[in-house]
Amino acid sequence: MRPPTPSPSSSSSSMGAFRLPALSHLLSPSKSLLSSPLSFPLRLRPPCLKSTVLIYGAAASRGISAQSLAKEDISPLAAPTADRKPSSRYEGSVTPRSADFNAWYLDVISSAELADYGPVRGTMVIRPYGYAIWESIQDYLNVKFKETGHSNMYFPQFIPYSFIEKEASHVEGFSPELALVTIGGGKELEEKLVVRPTSETIVNHMFTQWIQSYRDLPLMVNQWANVTRWEMRTKPFVRTLEFLWQEGHTAHATPEEAEKEALQMIDVYKKFAYEQAAIPVIAGKKSKAETFAGATRTYTIEAMMGDKKALQAGTSHNLGQNFSRAFGTQFTDENGQSQHVWQTSWAVSTRFVGGIIMTHGDDAGLMLPPRIAPIQVVIVPIWKTADDKSGVMDAVSSLREVLHKAGIKVKVDDSEQKTPGWKFNFWEMKGVPLRIEVGPRDVSNRTVVVCRRDIPGKPGKEFGISMEPSVLIAHVNSRLEDIQASLLQKATSFRDSNIVDVNSYEELKEAIAQGKWARGPWSASDTEELKVKEETGATIRCFPFEQPQGKMKCFMTGNPADEVAIFAKSY
């Protein structure tokens, strides 16, 4: 299954061994430190790698070596700092979003402790807080998958190369990104093995063994797994050599059932984006040029990031009978006739974490929608004397228990190495939706201060909120829902204000040049679609499901058009 990434454009048959580098091949981090004129923390460039991994496909044909991957789209992460005395200033400052969006994004990932670079260039280590966000995504989708009749299972990571070759468009689409294993146990393998780029081929190999009759249909499974794609330019969460995802695979007796399934699953993704991630995606159909290699139709959810680029956040593919014919996946129907099954596949990946960062984050760091936040409320106790501490901590312990029992994900930051001000900034950086402050005066008054992450400064602070359990629980739940709704509303307003309706190619070029999305009637050819991409850098993101009524003319050709398409630059 194709993940939410642009399609590769060329292939090659050049093959070789896939070997892990020895530890001695890892270079030490550069000794040169980059200092910022804005006094941001010093940065270290991630370690380079002298790798014996061979690059295949289009990359190999261009003579790209492992060392040349140093040009990937990444920048340094923050250098580790030594333990210090209590500080009132959180040192995880980030580049302003408006100054350099890419640097801001990478700074947030580092300072919010979401991920770090792996020793192999292009890989990342997902840290506990970043993984907890992925777990929130998993928790929601797992329930939805099972509600819609799917079962979780697991397929092997290694796939015979001959499987990839069986579906012509599939091998052509994926060849530039394949990582191959040719040596195992010190011996040359009889057949090269592909490190899983997607699982349609191996799924069909197994479906062929499991499906004999119409009684075996529909067969609907999902797996949570890792995937390897040898990307030339990488960006944490958005595009890495290895990433995590779920991929669903189904087999059906009729084309109508397969189409219904493909549409159902893109709707599951759309609801997750709106209701959980507070991202107002646009759902629609991909153009022929952007359709998954091996599918008859691809459906997508497209999200506008804070820099107005599009992010393909999830896809669902109607595979028709392309793979079942290639693998001979057949069943005997009710009339005793042999038929090929109709199939779908669909996926979202850890790319969604990147989408959440780029949609909601600000200059203070990450901003998480409450429904997917690993921590919804952080309580920061404030005291000066030992007597103050005792009373404050007793109250804080009680508050934590009350909120925890109410099902609210709460954390107490009672560390004494940092001041309250440092803690405020730190938890803002990590995007925790609500902060509760408790000091001696609050304890005396039996009240707390509640601060919203999405409203900076004093406007986001509420004083004198009662500690009485029923009052506090109701107030916290209400504010969490307010934040969830506010983030969606803000993202929707931003999206809508940056989509331009166009009626000519010149208007499209102007909109794209301004960094906006262009929406207009389209019935032009694949060649003209490629022209738009070459001249503007924009692609058709989708033909939205929601279409205007009435007669239209294609802005490119002047011919009648039945649909509008959305064009944008993308990740």
Image (cartoon, rainbow, N blue to C red):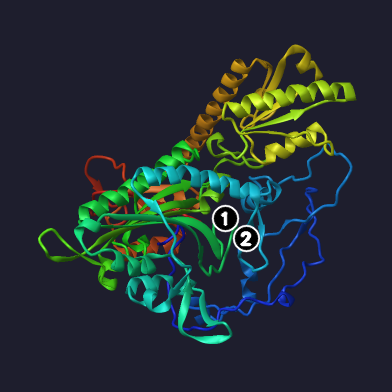
* Element carrying mark 2: strand
- Look at label 1 and name its amino acid: Phe
Which of these two is toward me, 344 or 175? 344
* Picture quadrant of residue 434: top right
Q: Which residue is mark 2?
A: 124
x and y percentages locating residue 376 in the rendered image: 61, 33
Which of these two is toward me, 456 or 122? 122
* Element carrying mark 1: loop
**Circle 1 crowding by C-alpha within 10 Å: few under 14, some 14–19, many from 20:** many
Q: Which residue is mark 1?
A: 237
Of marks 2 and 1, which one's residue comes earlier in the chain?
2
Question: So how many labels did they put on this image?
Answer: 2
> What residue is shown at x 51% (from left), y 67% (from top)?
229
Query: Is the C-beta separation of discs 2 and 1 under 8 Å?
Result: yes
Q: Can residue 10 be seen?
A: yes
> What residue is shown at x 57% (from left), y 82% (from top)?
185
* Picture quadrant of residue 26: bottom right
